[in-house]
Amino acid sequence: MFVVASAFALILLATSTRYGYHRDELYFLTAGRRLDWGYPDQPPLTPALARLMSAIDPDSLWLLRLPAVAAATFVVICAGLIAGELGGGRGAKALTAATVASAAMVQGAGHLFGTTVFDLAAWSLLCLLVLKLLRTSDDGASAADPRWWLPIGLVVGVGLLNKVLLIVPVGVLALALVLTGSRKMFATRYFAGALGIAALLVTPYLWWQASNGWPQWALSRAIAGGSSGTSDSPIMFVLLQFGLFGPLLAPLWIYGLWRLWRSRHRAFAVAYAVLFVVFLVSGGKAYYLGGMYPVLLAAGVVGLSGWLGAYGKRWVAAGSVVALNAALSASLFLPLLPVEAIPDSPVLAVNYDAGETIGWPRYVEQIAAAHPPGAAILTANYGEAGAIERYGAEYGLPTPHSGHNAYWWWGPPPDSATEVLTVGNRPRPPHRTLRGRRTPRCSRQRPRHRQRRTGRTTVPLPRSTPTVVAAVATPANPRLTRRTRRRDPIGVCGYDHTVRSWSTWRTRCRKPNRHGRSVLLCHALSAVPTRRRDPIGTAVVAAAAPVHPQLT
């Protein structure tokens, strides 16, 4: 088991510096430079850890990803120990560790610094500790030490500081334990102590959220509505369950689910079924269920090891299947291919995150080439803003601003900015007329595929997502008269609020909208860097078109 975990860690370390930063990693580094007890889209643990790694060496990608490698390796070790708690021997532990190490989700999460891998580690440790609480002696009496509740409370508290979604599987598993006849394990003062430890750890984050209007709750609803770039439809949610740990391992975890249902550990099978329905109905992402699969695989391997017995050929055959699954996962979720080969490979079609780790230095170089002296920078999403913060210092670029997630919380460009470079925001097209009347730019508009018929003329309207116009209302903009001030110089939020100033943006549109953003932003610009005048003629806006790092 430990040999497998060591080999897994070495592979992750060897590939950790290929390609470059993921946009989420750039965002965590940025959030770490603005430490707080909470953020509109996440708890404080992961940004604080990014701050710690950058304090040691701010330019080391290998060091930043070291905690992720350690967490993924810990998941592999926990899987082997879970197999031991389920009655597996040395061979079952090693094979379970190998199956989890071969999983696409574990490899992909372990390669990148982010909340997913730490969430996997916390959930794997929780499952292991709960299994220790379910121990019984040979005569069927409980042989568990109730003091295991105290580390469970500690793990839950720390896990919630990484990702608040952990409360859902924890609550479901507790309910499943009650429904499957394990109520007596809660009748101890150590359980109350566990609740106290978890509450104590998570209280500062909850206080921050309550003091700021619970912005993460609004963001969670936006993700459930499908606004995230990795949101899944119900059909894809079901199909991706067979791909998270590799299709070759699907029969094994299904067998493990069946074995758990027929054993005294039925609570885990019930928890999996309930979580599957909850995430499917609520619009959750497919990987939200990924923390359950190490337990299912461990149960499947323990049952399979009885059939493998002492037959060496059977063990070799099982190991060959696991090795093939590992090779397929690594080819798609680890940076093994040269960068030049990525566009012609199926990697981007399967692994969305691979494209987010390529091209950021060149991206910022093109932004610097189009940046007018003294102009502020407004980006479409936090990845672009994080890249500018990471690589822009050598070009003398200012701190960027954005309406995406926590960047909106950190404020708009200064009031003194009369010129703004917009990155990833498409300038609004010229006026379109309907029977000689100008169409409103600041109201919600129909998608391009829907059309409005006026008389005999069918006029296609702009896309429903409005564009931020980077004009700043200052005395230097004399054309903000009564005729024009109804038009939005900043943008339109998801609640159709007309935003006429940055202060109005803050007071009326604080919650993230259904797209997971506080202000809807477009994602395309012209093919050649140009200079355009904004639609209300109040400031000159420089529009740049860097190559997107997804190599499209």
Image (tube, rainbow, N blue to C red):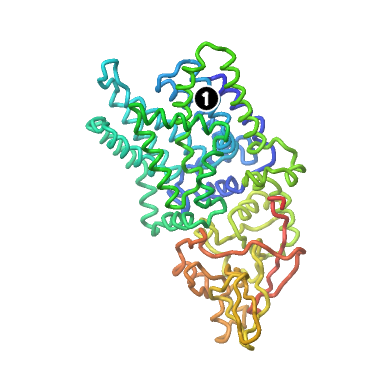
Classify 10 Å Cα crowding around label 1: few (below 14), some (14-19), many (20 and above).
many
Residue at coordinates 52% horizontally, 31% vertically from top-left? 251
Q: Nearer the viewer, residue 225 or 488?
A: 225
Q: Position of residue 78 (x, y in %)?
A: 46, 27
| x and y percentages locating residue 517 in the rendered image | 52, 60
- In the rendered structure, the answer to whether residue 328 lies left or right of residue 199 reads right
Query: Residue at 40% across / 32% down in the picture?
Result: 126
Q: Is residue 195 visible?
A: yes
Front-lying residue, 64 or 454: 454
Q: Nearer the viewer, residue 348 or 406?
A: 348
Where, by quadrant of the figure, is residue 458 drawn? bottom right
Residue where numbered disc 1 is placed: 97
Give the side of residue 297 with respect to residue 107, left or right. Answer: left
Q: Is residue 64 visible?
A: no
Query: Along the line of sight, which residue is nearer the eye, 296 or 482?
Result: 296
Tag 1's secondary structure?
A: helix
The amino acid beneath tag 1 is Ala
Q: How many marks?
A: 1
* Looking at the image, residue 232 lies above or below residue 534: above
Hey, which residue is sitting farthest bottom in the picture? 436
- Which of the 4 image quarters holds residue 85? top left
Q: Residue at x 61, y 58 (%)?
A: 400
Residue 381: x and y, percent? Answer: 59, 57
Specify whether 451 is left or right of 171: right
The percent position of residue 333, horizontal first and vertical second, equals: 63, 38
Q: Does residue 357 lie above or below 182 as drawn?
A: below
